[in-house]
Image: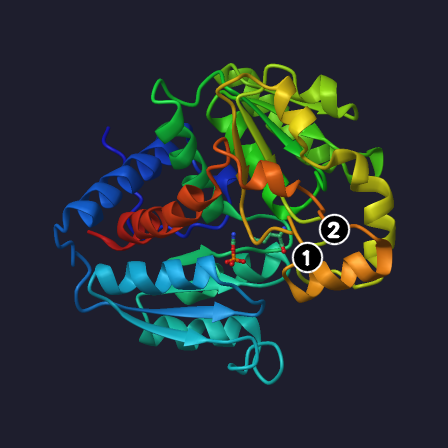
Amino acid sequence: MPVSLSGRSFLKLLDFTPEEIRYLIRLGHEFKRMKLEGTPHRHLKGKNIVLLFEKTSTRTRCSFEVAGHDLGMGVTYLDPAGSQMGKKESIADTARVLGRMFDGIEYRGYGQEIVEELAEYAGVPVWNGLTTEFHPTQMIADLMTIEEQFPQGARGLKLVFMGDAQNNVANSLMVVCAKLGMHFVACGPAEQMPAADLVETCRAIAAETGGSVTLEEDPMAACKDANVIYTDVWVSMGEPDEVWAERIKHLEKFRVTKEVMAMANPDAIFLHCLPAFHDTNTTTGADIAKRFGVTEMEVEDDVFESKQSKVFDEAENRMHTIKAVMYATLCG
Ligand code: CP
Ligand code: NVA
């Protein structure tokens, strides 16, 4: 049966089959080809979408905006202070109002239950642009980037996530790797490992797909023969400033360094969802350097800037794959 995601929300990858995930990645490649060739693709002309952001964003917001415009849609952006949701209007009421005006709703913010509730009441597809627990649109871009570098496909590849292995990006990577038959390694301190129930769920999925999920506290052992090394910030949006000291203490050993990369396969790639703290050219980076004497956090600047680093392909692919998600769920 051909895959159809028409009318579906995109809330977390646990809701999608491997075939459906592969279909979205394929569509992402297709939209990239059309964009690069200059082939117009205003397939959703006349539709309107709203982007509801309770946290800041560069890539996700711009991807939804450019993708929406390229597909011929009207796009409305509501910034973290720009809507009544949560303050003067409930999530259910907001969903029912926006669902009367728009054909699709993107939400970035806090608990996964918020985006799930929006989807329950909106009556139109809702897309998760990042919650505390998951970041599913990021995964479609990441897998597309991996396929660009490993044209034989992602199945069987080893991906190591280094650092805060219980955050939204790490959780989503564990799910997508399990779904696609990849070998996922969470490498971090015991304090920052993924929740046991999610690990168990992913292991059960991996048992079906030929993948695996491993937790490893030794970076050198974790990265041996890896195909993809991935990291993310040590403190995520919405976490209090006070956690920096503890995170730096626990996570310094899990920085992606040249030595770590040398353990991986020679053709291994480095990925990061971005934004990244690889130098002190940001206010937070400079502040951390002043307070803790740490000038590179989750990744060394040399790795970030190396040939193995595909982080800007990955960022570009957010746009192509968000186009795929919107097209797949709004077409038909
Ligand atoms: N990777 C990602 O989601 O980036 P933004 O926070 O800039 O959207
Ligand atoms: N874990 C990060 C991802 C940013 C794209 C955060 O939630 O801030």
> Badge 2 local density, few (<14 within 10 Å), some, or many (20+)?
some
Q: Is residue 249 left or right of residue 44?
A: right
Residue 229 position by quadrant: top right
Q: Residue at x 78, y 58 (%)?
A: 288
Q: What's under tag 1, amino acid-wise?
A: Thr
> Badge 1 local density, few (<14 within 10 Å), some, or many (20+)?
some
Is residue 265 visible in the rendered image? The answer is yes
User: In which quadrant of the rendered image does the N terminus lie?
Assistant: top left
Label 1 near label 2: C-beta < 8 Å? yes
Q: What's under tag 2, amino acid-wise?
A: Thr
Q: Residue at x 58, y 67 (%)?
A: 55
Residue extending farthest left: 39
Q: Residue at x 65, y 21 (%)?
A: 223
Q: Position of residue 249 (x, y in %)?
A: 87, 44
**Residue 295, which numbered label?**
2
Q: Is residue 195 left or right of residue 111?
A: right
Residue linked to disc 1? 280
Q: Position of residue 157 (x, y in %)?
A: 50, 19
Q: Considering the numbered disc 1 on the image, is that residue within a helix, a strand or a loop? A: loop
Q: Is mark 1 within 8 Å of ligand 2?
A: no
Q: Is residue 275 above or below residue 56?
A: above
